[in-house]
Image (tube, helix red, strand yellow):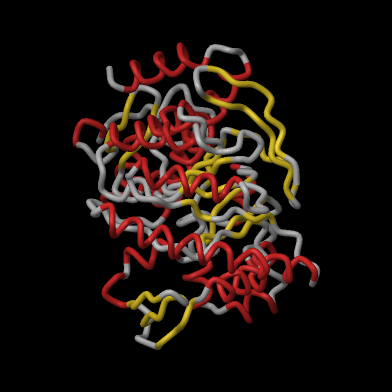
Amino acid sequence: MSFTLQAESGGARAGVLDTPRGPVQTPCFMPVATQASVKALDADDLARLNPRAILANSYHLYLRPGTETVKAAGGLHAFMGGYDGFIITDSGGFQVLSLSKLRAVDDEGVTFRSHLDGSKHRLTPESVIAVQAELGSDGWTTLDECPPYPCAEADAARALERTRRWLDRSVPAVAAARAAGAKSLFFPLYQGGLHPRLRRPSAEHHNDCPADGISIGGFMVGEDKPTTWAMLGETTALLRADRPRYLMGVGTPSDIWDAAACGVDMMDCVYPTRVARSGHIMTASGKFNVTNARFRRDFTPLDPECSCFVCARYTKAYLGHLLRASELAAYRLLSYHNLHFMAGVAAQARAAVLAGRFASARADFLARLSS
């Protein structure tokens, strides 16, 4: 693996990550395929969008359909119908937080009840790596304990220390999987809560870890955006510059620019598809809901500046009608547009870095978005 840093501008970076599935240009936004599917889209839609990196969730896939099924299909790429890009898998650490009523955490790992059928399962740092190896993903993350927000510093420190020990236990598991033939990149989780004193030793530990990149966790868990960006900026300043930085769970249009300004290279979020299913449309001029009454006889595209096939073919009136009528095609078409738009935002941010005008381009984008 190599990460080539091509340019820096206004705190942002542009680079190229070489992966087992080809190059990924950064900054990039990664669509989320939690269940080995980007919600509402099929393999042809994904091929048309052509994201070079996506996120899947090893916790959910371990429970359903099971790693044995995915492996028997030939791995995640084949199981999904031949997606040929880079797939990074979340370890399930976030579910340790979000499904807190169904799990118990100890120093050795996590015991939890399935949210599907109540069956009992055990995750350890080693088993999480083994699950991802079975799935055949191209990027692996580590089991972590994400502290809630707000959280006392002492509690965040305990979670951080546990996460660091789990990372150390993951390293030989990754080495063993690679010795057995796996070619995946290693993106261990970086925690520390929203406490600067904890983030520094965590960064030093990760900088010394034999890794290919870093997955930045613990943000967007309830804190306000100014706190996010202030803490994130302090965080990335501590990290090695020669490794790609992946900020997990972040992805509104303005977030792309704000995170990039903090030196982040990769982002993912369910936001674009989630809001699409309720009719919210992203454009450079801001977000609107296509089911609003004023669009019932609006025979213009969702975004006249957009080059996606949805905007080329369909009107606001028609798409709003589909959603009000609960026609399933609406979810596909609106989700596709939003993901196309997000890919364009990331491409704009990258181009601005390469041109040496990131700060002014960011200001222009945010000003238009809020106008």
Viewer-proximal residue among 226 and 29 = 226
Viewer-proximal residue among 111 and 68 = 111
Relative to 172, say whether 187 is above or below.
Answer: above
Is residue 191 in sight in this rendering? yes
Is 25 left, or right, of 34 in this rendering? Answer: right
Quarter of the image for the C terminus: give it: top left
Relative to 116, say whether 29 is above or below.
Answer: above
User: Residue at left 67%, top 40%?
Assistant: 24
Relative to 300, say whether 84 is above or below.
Answer: below
Is 341 left, or right, of 86 in this rendering? Answer: left
Is residue 313 in sight in this rendering? no
On the image, the x and y values in percent for residue 110 come to 42, 76
On the image, the x and y values in percent for residue 136 come to 68, 66
Is 333 left, or right, of 74 in this rendering? Answer: left
Q: Residue furthest bottom?
A: 119
Is 74 left, or right, of 168 in this rendering? Answer: right
User: Residue at left 32%, top 58%?
Assistant: 147
Q: Residue furthest left?
A: 293
User: Residue at left 27%, top 31%?
Assistant: 297
On the image, the x and y values in percent for residue 64 come to 50, 77
User: Residue at left 47%, top 33%?
Assistant: 341
Viewer-proximal residue among 309 and 38 = 38
Relative to 196, say whether 20 is above or below.
Answer: below
Viewer-proximal residue among 261 and 243 = 243
On the image, the x and y values in percent for residue 159 come to 37, 61
Tag count: 0
